[in-house]
Image (spheres, rainbow, N blue to C red):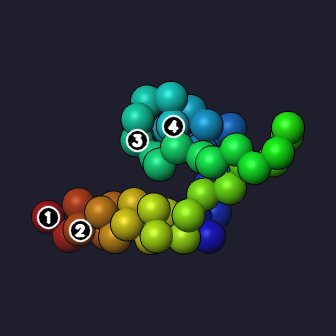
Amino acid sequence: MTSLSKSTIYKMIAEKKFPRQIQIGPQQVVWTKHDVQDWMNQKIQEAAL
């Protein structure tokens, strides 16, 4: 959905620049569609400034 690599996403999470993942299994995580869309909309608004 974002076209970002996994390593970039996890780096951004550590920097509090991307929504945190939700653990659904021992090695499985997800993000809510709403959280990711909100993040993308924020980035679009920042780019428009």
| Closer to the camera in the image, 34 or 17 | 34
Crowding near the residue tagged with mark 2, few <14, some 14–19, many ≥20 C-alpha atoms within 10 Å: few
Alpha-carbon neighbours of circle 4 within 10 Å: few (<14), some, or many (≥20)?
some
- Decide if residue 40 is in sight here: no
The residues tagged by marks 2 and 1 sit, at their Cα atoms, a distance apart of: 7 Å
Point out residue 42 in the picture as x, y percentages from the top left corner: 30, 63
- Mark 1 residue element: loop
Q: Quadrant of the N terminus?
A: bottom right
Separation of residues labelled 1 and 3 (CA atoms): 18 Å
Q: Residue at x 75, y 50 (%)?
A: 24
* Identity of the residue drawn at 60% across and 58% down: 31
Residue at image x 40%, y 35%? 16
Write down the residue under mark 1.
49
SS type, badge 4: helix
Which image quarter: residue 6? top right
Query: Disc 3 versus disc 2: distance between alpha carbons?
Result: 15 Å
State the residue position of label 3.
Answer: 17
- State how far apart marks 4 and 1 are (Cα): 24 Å
Q: What residue is rendered at 37% in x and 66% in y?
A: 38
Label 4 sits on what residue type?
Ile
Q: Which residue is mark 4?
A: 13
| Comes first in the chain, label 3 or label 2 | 3
Q: Is residue 29 left or right of residue 41?
A: right
**Lower position in the chain sequence, tag 4 or tag 2:** 4
Q: Residue furthest left?
A: 49
Q: Which residue is mark 2?
A: 45
Q: Name the quarter where the C terminus is drawn.
A: bottom left
**How many residues crowd around disc 3 within 10 Å: few (fewer than 14), some, or many (20 or more)?**
few
